[in-house]
Image: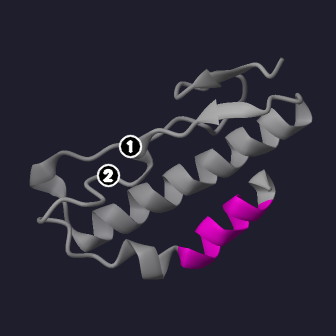
């Protein structure tokens, strides 16, 4: 049996996800929050790997307003390398 958990990780430090309100969405704020959230996700995956946790549901909050029309920042291009790195950790 594989055991895991959904979304909220409290097992290690530097893994708290950040968020934005729609009124604060701009490129600078998105870059900062997404970068911090991807760093946190990387820490969570490292923790899960070290503790043989094979199942984890990643929250959609990692990329605030990722598909919202007010988000015109090309976060996919900006963070493609980091996303690939995280994907490689999972495989």
- Residues drawn in magenta: 80-88
Residue 47 rendering spot, x and y as whole percentages: 80, 36
Given residues 91 and 25, the one toward you in this image is 91
Q: Please, is residue 45 above or below residue 87 in the view? A: above
Q: Is residue 20 left or right of residue 6?
A: left
Residue located 43% across and 74% down the image: 76
Could you classify mark 2 by the number of other residues whose Cα lies within 10 Å: few (under 14), some (14-19), or many (20 or more)?
many
Tell me the chief SS of the magenta region.
helix
Instruction: Please determine whether, in this image, residue 81 is positioned above or below residue 10.
Output: below
The residue at the far front in this view is 1
Q: What label sits on residue 80 in the rendered view? A: none
Along the viewing direction, whichever of 61 and 57 lies nearer the viewer: 57
The residue tagged 2 is: 64
Q: Quadrant of the N terminus?
A: top right
| CA distance for labels 1 and 2 | 5 Å
The residue carrying pointer 1 sits among few (fewer than 14), some (14 to 19) or many (20 or more) residues within 10 Å by Cα, namely some
Quarter occupied by residue 55 = top right
Q: Secondary structure at mark 2?
A: loop
Report x, y in % for residue 56: 65, 33
| Colour scheme in use | one colour
Residue for point 80% across, 56% down: 91
Count of numbered circles on the image: 2
Q: In this rendering, would 3 be left or right of 23? A: right
Is residue 16 in the magenta section? no
Q: Position of residue 24 (x, y in %)?
A: 16, 55
Q: Residue at x 55, y 76 (%)?
A: 80
Q: Nearer the viewer, residue 18 or 48?
A: 48
Residue for point 53% across, 24% down = 8
Q: Which residue is mark 1?
A: 61
Q: Quadrant of residue 26?
A: bottom left
Q: Are marks 1 and 2 in contact (CB under 8 Å)?
A: yes
């Amino acid at each position: 049996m594989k055991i895991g958990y959904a979304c909220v990780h409290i097992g290690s430090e530097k893994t708290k996800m950040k968020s934005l309100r729609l009124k604060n969405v701009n490129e600078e704020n998105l870059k900062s929050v997404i970068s911090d959230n991807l760093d946190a996700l990387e820490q969570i995956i490292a923790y899960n790997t070290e503790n043989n946790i094979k199942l984890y549901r990643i929250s959609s909050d990692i990329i605030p307003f990722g598909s919202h029309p007010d988000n015109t920042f090309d976060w996919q291009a900006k963070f493609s390398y980091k996303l690939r790195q995280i994907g490689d950790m999972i495989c």
